[in-house]
Image (cartoon, helix red, strand yellow):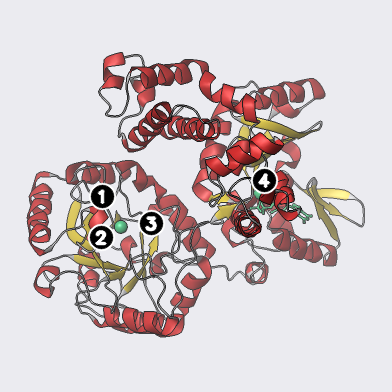
Amino acid sequence: MDNKAIATIFYETADLMKVASADPFRIRSYERAAEALEGWPQQVAEIYQDEKALLAIPGIGKGMAANIRELMTEGKLASHEEMLQKFRPSMLELLKISGLGPKTIALIWDAFQVCDVDGVAKLASEGKLRTLPRLSEKSEQKILKAIESYRQLTGRFLLSVADDIARKITDFLKDLPGVEKVTPAGSLRRGRETVGDLDLLVTGKCCDNDAQRNKVIERILSFPGILEVLGKGENKVSFKLRSGMQVDVRLLLPDSFGAAMQYFTGSKNHNVTLRQRALKQGYTLNEYGLVRVEDNKRVAGKTEEEIYKKLGLAFIPPELREDCGEIQAAAEDKLPELITLADLQGDVHMHTVETDGKCTIEEMALAARQHGYKYMAITDHSKNLAFANGLDDKRAEAHIRKIRAAAKQIEGIRIFAGIEVDILAEGELDLSDSVLEQMDLVIASVHSHFNQEPAQMTDRLLRVIENPNTSIMGHPTGRMLLRREGFVFDYDKVFSAAAKAGVAMEHNAYPDRLDLRDQHLRMAKAKGVKFVVNTDAHHTSHIENVRYGVMQLRRAWLGKQDVLNTLPAAHFAKMMRRVLPLLEEAS
Ligand code: DGT
Ligand code: CA
Ligand code: CA
Ligand code: ZN
């Protein structure tokens, strides 16, 4: 159990206790512990047996230390379980609806013993909530609206969240005898930015007969955090986790594994088009294999590769399987050569403790070097981002000196001094030109005034592009997945101007952002824009998030040549200062 998982359980306990009107001091102690754990750099799993080490974490007292130990040894927490029993687990979901606070939920619970989203929606639409103190017809309408927008946003999860769970379940199963492979399929394998449910495929000798399959299913069902089993068959089991995520696991014979992978990876539209192609060529294609109609002979199924090959197609990478022309391109052998993780030589958007990061310059640099990068950049925030302790001119200059000093000390990786400078309301940059000029690279990002009219936003961004100090536009639309739509501007105009001026667009690989999205990446590429994929790391562990960013780039059909941080350091550095025309060949 990692810090985040413990923090989640503490937050949940606190929320449930609020509904139960428990002692506010106790509630607060759960919340403080959760906040402390979220920001604590060391995993408490490593130190939980050492009481002193736990108590050294600010916000953790004796009671919470005991709770952490209980969670680590039992895998659950009695106070949390007790609350869940009292209210039923659906209460957790209800608490996630903004606009429905614990007080209102407590009122509803006390009067109707209802604690699920559908139940509350029903009470509201039947006009029963207005009978409660402090609730009116108007509040019923507000609650219904909140539930509606909750439903639109939910049901989907960040790619990183699904990936995390997939890895945990894989780990949980991999030591079982006869398990050869556990592989994600569905939208996770295609690298979609959000995932509806998690599809996992298990194969190996463990799937040979009923008795063995039963053993695997039994083991799967003992995975911690399962809230509810939704369905169970001979070779399939579906369940819902506490987080609300549904997981579909299928057990497959190795002989038809490729066909199943192909089928369950989707997308549905890709599969439909592929099946039509198969039919035209005299085959049927399903999850068990590719079968020639003529003699009913199975001609492929063990691997995906042989299925595509038999259909006269080049292998189509999962990220492209959205029925956007990839089958045609594969038939003509015109699929693009997609960028891979190994192509990247650096990550040039990172924060440190100087602003809102959690690690030092040295720690970030060593982690980037460990990852295999040849270069990286420290790009802390500027002063407009006050809550992040952003840098003013003076601190920014001092920070450059610190970065240069660290660069002298650390070998094996080039460390650029950069900044993520705020774009102010009218498109001015938040630091003086004389300071920005000293930077190796300048990322300009919007962190405020998101709600400008598209025309005003367009002018604002065009002004940033005209500024000769701008190297990169950071997270260009400002979207937050499942929380906030990106702001709208004239994409054609801005992308064209950026291409012309030699300003690169960032693809921000932070899992909540994945900004630009795939369509915008394609649009920008068509205008001649070059990209930089960055993690916006606020902690050394975030550097690994780059894999989500690369999946998005692949979904947009981008190759190595589209992405500047595949270049060697010296060439990359020149591009950032806009000294050379952007389209110059890689040296
Ligand atoms: P999601 O879960 O909404 O993020 O998206 P997917 O693509 O993971 O969709 P899901 O979980 O419903 O199904 C997984 C894959 O299984 C899907 O990509 C293709 C395949 N599949 C599911 N239902 C059908 C179907 O009715 N027809 C075909 N051809 N394929 C299907
Ligand atoms: Ca799925
Ligand atoms: Ca599914
Ligand atoms: Zn940043």
- In the picture of the structure, the residue carrying the numbered disc 2 is 385
The residue beneath circle 4 is 117
- Proximity of marks 2 and 1: CB atoms separated by less than 8 Å: yes
Report the residue at 36% width, 30% height from top. Answer: 33
- Estimate the spatial distance between the alpha carbons at disc 3 and disc 1, rounded to whole Å: 29 Å
Residue 499 falls in image quadrant: bottom left
Asked whether residue 252 appears in the rendered view, the answer is no
Three-letter amino acid code at disc 1? Asp
Disc 2 vs disc 3: which is toward the camera? 2
Q: Is 321 left, or right, of 547 in this rendering? A: right
> What is the distance, in whole Å, between disc 1 and disc 4 at their CAs?
36 Å
Residue that carries the numbered disc 3 in the rendered image: 343
Picture coordinates of residue 147, whole percent (x, y): 63, 54
Query: Residue 83, position in %: x, y?
Result: 57, 26
Looking at the image, residue 34 sits to the left or right of residue 540; the answer is right
Task: Give the spatial CA distance, label 2 vs label 3.
Answer: 33 Å
Q: Secondary structure at mark 1?
A: loop
Amino acid of disc 2? Leu
Give the residue at the far right of this rendering: 295
Residue at 44% across, 58% down:
513
Q: Residues within 10 Å of mark 3 (few under 14, many from 20)?
A: some
Kindly report the distance in space between the C-alpha atoms of the residues bearing marks 2 and 4.
37 Å
Frontmost residue, 16 versus 407? 16
Task: Give the residue number, with chain letter if any, for mark 1.
Answer: 356
In this view, 469 is above or below 91 = below
Q: Earlier in the sequence, mark 3 or mark 4?
A: 4
Nearest to viewer (mark 3 / mark 1): 1
Question: Quick one: quadrant of the C terminus?
Answer: bottom left
